[in-house]
Image: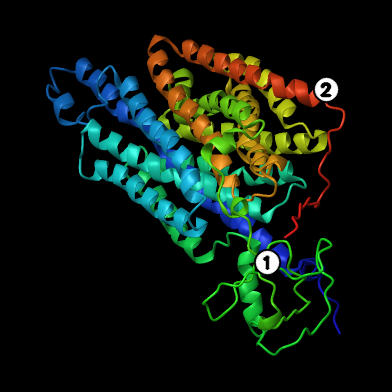
Amino acid sequence: MAPVPPGIRFLASFNKDQWYRAFTFGLTFLLYTSFHLSRKPISIVKSELHKNCSALTELSTASSSQLPSLTDVDCSWKPFDKSNYKQLLGAMDYSFLCAYAVGMFLSGIIGERLPIRLYLSVGMVMSGLFTCLFGLGYVYNIHSLSFYICVQVANGLVQTTGWPSVVTCIGNWFGKGRRGLIMGIWNSHTSVGNILGSLIAGYWVSSNWGLSFIVPGIIIAVMGVVCFLFLIEHPNDLKGIHAEQNGGPCGQNQKLTKNWNGKNGHKQLYHSYKQGSKGQNWDTELLLPPEDVSVCVSVQQQLVVVKSESELTAISFMGALRIPGVIEFSLCLLFAKLVSYTFLFWLPLYITKAAHLDAKKAGNLSTLFDVGGIVGGILAGVISDKLGKRATTCAVMLLLAAPTLYGFSMISEFGLGPTIAMLLVCGGLVNGPYALITTAVSADLGTHKSLKGNSRALSTVTAIIDGTGSVGAAIGPLLAGLLSSRGWDQVFYMLMSADFLALLLLLRLVTKELTSTNVVKPRSGSTTVEMKEH
């Protein structure tokens, strides 16, 4: 008999639960990658919208006798051909992000009460539709500013279905052990989506910028269908499949085939029985035995457990705000996300103007900021796991980001090498705290001990934190559009001020972490479970 190859031996070492966990990790990663992939094209296309008009205007001025009507005929992409084009582009950003911020507060509450898979799938398909609709403005030669703003508002609203859904799903599958590392790696989907969006949009930006939106729109819509077909919201959802594979539920006269002493010290098998139905609705959360242990209990002997109303009811908005740390981290994220999204929407245009590159090269170079963001997010997760201090980790990175932002404002004086290094470092320090707060911190607070085991709070807490951050994401690009007319240095002064305000808002939590003498670091793979007597 030939020896088993090492690779197959490695794959066989994982059990079924680990494979499902890895599958959910990868699927949710790809799902939210498509969200950011569809948001990025607007920042790439900005420089092209005005570049066409400005270039042709100069050409027409230089040779007005030979080409008297060049501007009227060819420079027809309005309304972005005017001197206030930065304000108009900023208004489009603001319309999307303002709708996103408002919708996010409602999205978490709605998502907590609907099936995540259906809610997320519908949102992705609708987002694909509106993204394609923006690109069709080029195909059908639409020049109405109100058309593009309405499309941006609608797209901002439907995109709010994404973040609370994927964070809740990944939180259901992964416990607190190494949460910072796992979610730091997982959160790189933001930067990966931005990179892919830049490359896809940049490929068509100079020839047919409509395709820069249509292609990402098709991708996110297709991923919405994939989500509907394959997303597993919770590990317990698989128990029904396993029961069917093992011969289905026990009949009325079947006996216990194997002894089971219970899990977490509980010797009874808790399950619920829906009165009036033919089958049993098994409540498997935390109490099911391992898959290789078969348990059958006759219907006459079943113990019906009615959970208290507090366990069944999703947390309220005000209840989520009362969780310690939610308000501080939410306000901190407002300013941190302001900085991050200003880079997301304005970095390619800034590189075009400051480094004197064309739209495609500027778009490709801007992806290095997101590469740095991937490293920064993972590094923030690893450090916070090791120290057990999330707020302190964020504060240190925010402190280091301020001088980096000042150096980045002088990018026009650098060569290509220093510019690349500055993009990587700045991306890591700006996106590190943003990534940590929106993932590991949100998951920690959504499962805070003050909730007393209520698992239906994660989506609402995540939506509050990210919704507050999205207010900053809406304000940042708008301010950048207004201030850039006075010079790009004014934009960077605004970003540095926001960075310091984010740091100040964390000082109370940082002080509490540093003075605490009984910080308990989560052990790898450990899960604390609080059981209630029934």
Q: Earlier in the sequence, mark 1 or mark 2?
A: 1
Q: CA distance from mark 1 to mark 2?
A: 40 Å
Q: Quadrant of residue 242?
A: bottom right
Residue assigned mark 1: 284
Tell me the quadrant of the picture where the C terminus can be found: bottom right
Say which residue appears at 75% left-offset and 79% top-offset.
Answer: 295
Q: Nearer the viewer, residue 519 or 148?
A: 519
Q: Secondary structure at mark 2?
A: helix
Residue assigned mark 2: 515
Say which residue appears at 67% left-offset and 33% top-offset.
Answer: 376
Relative to 291, 107 lies left or right: left
Q: Position of residue 280 (x, y in %)?
A: 60, 76
Q: Is residue 354 above or below residue 176?
A: above
Tell me the quadrant of the picture where the N terminus can be found: bottom right
Relative to 254, 127 lies left or right: left
Q: Secondary structure at mark 1?
A: loop
Q: Quadrant of residue 460?
A: top right
Q: Position of residue 93 (x, y in %)?
A: 38, 30
Q: Is residue 202 visible?
A: no
Q: Position of residue 360 (x, y in %)?
A: 43, 35
Say which residue appears at 42% left-offset and 32% top-offset.
Answer: 97
Image depth: mark 1 or mark 2 in front: 1
Q: What residue type is disc 1 on?
A: Thr
The crowding category of the residue bearing disc 2, from other C-alpha atoms within 10 Å (few below 14, some 14 to 19, many at least 20), is few
Number of numbered discs visible in the structure rendering: 2
Relative to 183, 155 lies left or right: left
Q: Position of residue 355 (x, y in %)?
A: 49, 20
- Colouring of the image: rainbow
Q: What residue type is disc 2 on?
A: Thr
